[in-house]
Image (spheres, coloured by chain):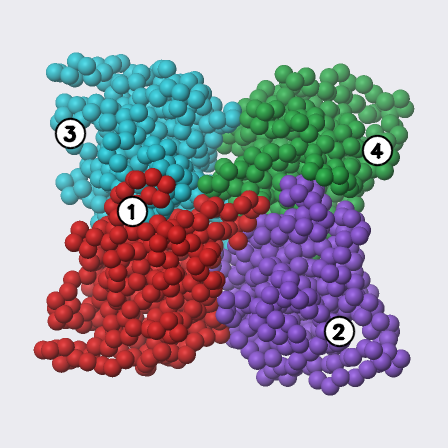
Chain colours: A green, B purple, C red, D cyan
Amino acid sequence: MDARSLPGHADLVVRRFHPTPDQYAWTFGGVDPVERVSPGEVLELYTEDCFAGRIRGIGDLPATSIEYPFINPQTGPFFVEGAEPGDTLAIHLVDVAPARDWAVSTSVSLFGALTPTQLTASLQDPLPERTWLYRVLEQEREVVFHAVDSDFETRFPLQPFHGTIGVAPAAFEVRNALVPDAFGGNMDSPEVRAGTTIFLGVNVPGALFSLGDGHYTMGEGETCGAAVEGAMNTVLVVDVIKGTFCEWPRLESDDAIMVAGSCRPLEDAFRIAHAQVVRWVAGAVGLSLMDAYQLVSQAARSRIANVVDPNYTIVAKVPKRFLPGDVRWMAGVHERLRSIGAEYLSAVHRTPVWSPG
Amino acid sequence: MDARSLPGHADLVVRRFHPTPDQYAWTFGGVDPVERVSPGEVLELYTEDCFAGRIRGIGDLPATSIEYPFINPQTGPFFVEGAEPGDTLAIHLVDVAPARDWAVSTSVSLFGALTPTQLTASLQDPLPERTWLYRVLEQEREVVFHAVDSDFETRFPLQPFHGTIGVAPAAFEVRNALVPDAFGGNMDSPEVRAGTTIFLGVNVPGALFSLGDGHYTMGEGETCGAAVEGAMNTVLVVDVIKGTFCEWPRLESDDAIMVAGSCRPLEDAFRIAHAQVVRWVAGAVGLSLMDAYQLVSQAARSRIANVVDPNYTIVAKVPKRFLPGDVRWMAGVHERLRSIGAEYLSAVHRTPVWSPG
Amino acid sequence: MDARSLPGHADLVVRRFHPTPDQYAWTFGGVDPVERVSPGEVLELYTEDCFAGRIRGIGDLPATSIEYPFINPQTGPFFVEGAEPGDTLAIHLVDVAPARDWAVSTSVSLFGALTPTQLTASLQDPLPERTWLYRVLEQEREVVFHAVDSDFETRFPLQPFHGTIGVAPAAFEVRNALVPDAFGGNMDSPEVRAGTTIFLGVNVPGALFSLGDGHYTMGEGETCGAAVEGAMNTVLVVDVIKGTFCEWPRLESDDAIMVAGSCRPLEDAFRIAHAQVVRWVAGAVGLSLMDAYQLVSQAARSRIANVVDPNYTIVAKVPKRFLPGDVRWMAGVHERLRSIGAEYLSAVHRTPVWSPG
Amino acid sequence: MDARSLPGHADLVVRRFHPTPDQYAWTFGGVDPVERVSPGEVLELYTEDCFAGRIRGIGDLPATSIEYPFINPQTGPFFVEGAEPGDTLAIHLVDVAPARDWAVSTSVSLFGALTPTQLTASLQDPLPERTWLYRVLEQEREVVFHAVDSDFETRFPLQPFHGTIGVAPAAFEVRNALVPDAFGGNMDSPEVRAGTTIFLGVNVPGALFSLGDGHYTMGEGETCGAAVEGAMNTVLVVDVIKGTFCEWPRLESDDAIMVAGSCRPLEDAFRIAHAQVVRWVAGAVGLSLMDAYQLVSQAARSRIANVVDPNYTIVAKVPKRFLPGDVRWMAGVHERLRSIGAEYLSAVHRTPVWSPG
């Protein structure tokens, strides 16, 4: 992963990493880093889709194409210089761009929100597996859905994001890449998109972050268990906030602050996310806990992320326009990384497919 | 409730009803109708706030001002001519307008998402009760939040809707007005706003619908247990679809079709709403169940309504732009009632505060 | 329901009631009392099975034999003289005896713990309906299970109890007889058996209690949604505790005190039951809340009642042998009613099939 | 861990292992084995209590005595010769005997069933931490509870078992020793006692099993988050069943077969355990799935294990007396290991404190 600089932008250090299949990580934690990176460097990364690219047509079904637990291959983990337990890692997504002109989705046996699963067990036979192939219309910024049992066709907006982003867990744990939890992981939240900074508490030296599971678009909840899954070319910049630890993933965009809670039942995911954001607002704005509780109750624009993974995820979201303009959220790191991202985008003449907002 | 007609709109039958305090209903079912109404008539209704107007300042607290179960006074129930068990009642909200220039919110002992409650019981003392008084800025279409423990102030958009709308339940039941379920009720969904048609399966002759619990604005989930609560002047038109029964509340706006699911845990509310909308789409569009499952999985723009009531509510929402334009959802009743509403608004020179969309 | 007295027991007032089919109640609340009874009177009651006696062989299936909501016919409600809102009704079960030499169980479409239901919705077809016919071996105190798809046969102990017992709900509600909640109802707990006293908070004048849903035996959780269902001849005595209100059903046997919690998810039923029993023990024994919390944590012999009804039920149970012997639980009413029951059983030369213990 | 043999029992290979503090494992998976053991060998093991012995009096509180995640020290892991992924490890507990004449229990901040926790989050301050010291009365087979806020004293039966027993997880995971899941772990089930055989699917070469978290007694659900915690001297024998894989922990005693399900919400733990036991019974007895569903529904004597850990646990239990006597459950391994255990107990003249049954 050699560094290069961009013409006319000598201050930008840009490094590219495209994993070979034997370099994929299948867990958060428990894996040696593929590279060491430094705060402020721009990373250009390739991520394979959640099926490791093995499902490429409607004849490829999960049961025959995939061998559990080889799902959600991660690009990484990366060792971040200077990140120590008790710090917080900030990852700013500069660009999240589809790497292919097609994508797939599937139903998966014993997985999904509207079917019995291995955890919500029943005595019934599982729903059948099906695969849907999507075309990407780059110009129109859309993906095309074509039914498998009829000729119906429709289009969804191209809204690329990463289903999975996280660091090595606490308490010596290693978690499968299908699991979201306090360390991030498979949250499946559309908020993890270009323009957003993700803050993750550091549990091990170097933080060991990775990402993957690119989604070209997804409905709230990822109901059937899969989004429109595709490989990504993603650009990001990292930073480390020393001496501050985020218990649960925080996110920040130009417009909002957010906290992701992942748990079961779904109301516990809601409770985690909202209790965290209430305390964050109270502390940062200088409100009493009850005033912050009231403010968040009326201001939240929270979203269901997933209701299908081993933990469910809800992202509590408070628009900044309801909050004082002079608060420096998370030490102003989002603004700093965002300006590096803007310089990079300007240098390479690119605009993210899905604009922040 | 005398009928009148509007100058130049002889075809519009308009009737007004403003309940006296002794006319409030506190349940769905079990109460005699206050009036009989006919499909196509325009009803102008007044609804009191969820506290029956008894909390008017920061010194008024729920524990001392309210006596359970006298919460959520309902305007109604109305007997709809021609509605029989097995039919579906359609209620189109033409206008939902704040009736006062102030509103209130409170924390309530043992109620809310971030506190132990009577159902999520613990051994701890409850959080304290507080009341917040909001000013309504009509011109700016905003409400002003003022903290009770400091001088902090901020504004939220004025987005009026009804927390509660429903019919008499099935199975001879009578339910308290705090409960959402298959009959509608206290769903606390911002989708129940001007421009939306709500479809409710009819369980008893006349359907016996009522509404109340006006919210001037609310965050997703109604986290603390109360929205910005206020009295409303609401205009609506009803219709009856014979021989069709909605198992769970359906909603339709110009832009989307929706189903509300209410249950605990929250994932069961999600499951109900999404299983219903998948089957609805499959049937109306002519898709296989698996194709509809996939379509909804990528198309849903679903929202958390409440995580605080005896049942939690999630509204599955599928934008119409992803669906064929030639589908007549629910026999085209939304379009028909919407045109009556448009004529009324034109006649009275009004525009809803919160435009559909 | 004429009163009679038993030879040599002039002080015992005994009354018998066998409902005709048109006298069944299908709800808690919302129904006029069938009779008025007084504290201390012995009532001999007949209760039909949950299928109203319409399923009598393996060819009778719920879908064709039963019309919802005509399930769980209740014997009652009875108006108890002197019972006022804020009091507590005590019902002591003297005898619960099978009224037939056969019983049935079924699987029910979209009902049960190991199948998707109307609330835990999925897109799958429901499990098939089946009916099993049980023979009662009175001498051996057993019921005989015979498989429907093979010749396998086995026997379960005859352990008769009532799935359903309750009073009219609070907050003007009327609830279907399938629902358990704070008013009791369809708790499906084997603790509701001969020798147990059930305490229910009174919400309406006369309390209006009823019972039904006899089970000849049942496993923990009522997994498939039905127990071994049969008609019962049940004998009980009631009393009223003035000025004391039980928020949730309390139960007392010679050996234990108990509280039933009914809610979803199942952990909320657990929380309700155990928080209630901790506070009860703390108050009655004179312990601090934390000491009572610790005591209950090590002493509880709690049981899963049902995981299939609209609310799930868990019964927190603390054996009396771990508690001081001199506590008069619930004003000593259990002992008083128990001695009336003992006199009755002695007078009629009967012993309950399932002995307390 | 040298092998020895017992006088007159040359066929018994007995090995003893008492870990030093630096040998504790704090996870399932991710740790090198402390020893290699062979099927049929008798292991005498010492396990420290869940607090690593650091809480020894009522002045020692979790917040100051324990540093998360150093909870639940495991004795092990042991590499079992011949155990390969896809096999099942059988662990028969011959004896589980208290190693001290005292034990402790505590309330733990943000942990327990009747308090908000880190997952069921609220805005309230946590309940206070308290420690209770128990005396063990060996002769009476009881432990003595003494209240901390008064002089109240009572006794509970001495019923020793292991809260924690498990193997290395699947999917490359490493899990903290507080977590129960498909690999076993912190199930906190009183069924894990002397006389029981635990069957665990093998995920990694050697299975890598460990155990700990001795409980001298515990109520159903472990309500406050801690049992009566104490060090144990435990004797066990292992075996390997080749080519058979248990998806979830199975247990067998002389009297019953069982399956442990661990998940959230609690009904999902119930569903897992009961769906597994229904399929197990159907297969082993030769019943149709529906017949087995019915049989289990009436036969289950299932118990709530814990409602406090990151996953909750319920153990589905079917007494063997309801099942054919000629079924060889799990290849008859329980009987084989039980006879080795009986020989050992006879050789050392010991009887387990808590007799099976």
Q: Which residue is mark 3?
A: D350
Crowding at dot 4, Cα within 10 Å, few <14 / some 14-19 / many 20+, comes out as few
Locate residue D166: give its quadrant: top left
Q: Nearer the viewer, residue B145 or D332?
A: D332
Crowding at dot 2, Cα within 10 Å, few <14 / some 14-19 / many 20+, comes out as some
Residue C105 point in image, percent of width and height: 36, 52
Q: Are marks 4 and 3 on the same chain?
A: no
Q: Who's the residue at 69% across and 81% down the image?
A: B18
Residue C122 point in image, percent of width and height: 56, 46
Give the label, 4 or 3, closer to the camera.
4
Q: Which residue is mark 1?
A: C145
For the residue labelled by badge 3, is the local secondary structure a helix, a strand or a loop?
Answer: loop
For the residue labelled by badge 4, is the local secondary structure a helix, a strand or a loop?
Answer: loop
Report the amino acid beneath label 2: Gly
Q: CA distance from mark 4 to mark 3?
A: 76 Å
Q: CA distance from mark 1 to mark 3?
A: 41 Å
Report the amino acid beneath label 3: Arg
D273, above or below C351, in the image: above
Q: Which residue is mark 2?
A: B40
Q: Which residue is mark 4?
A: A138
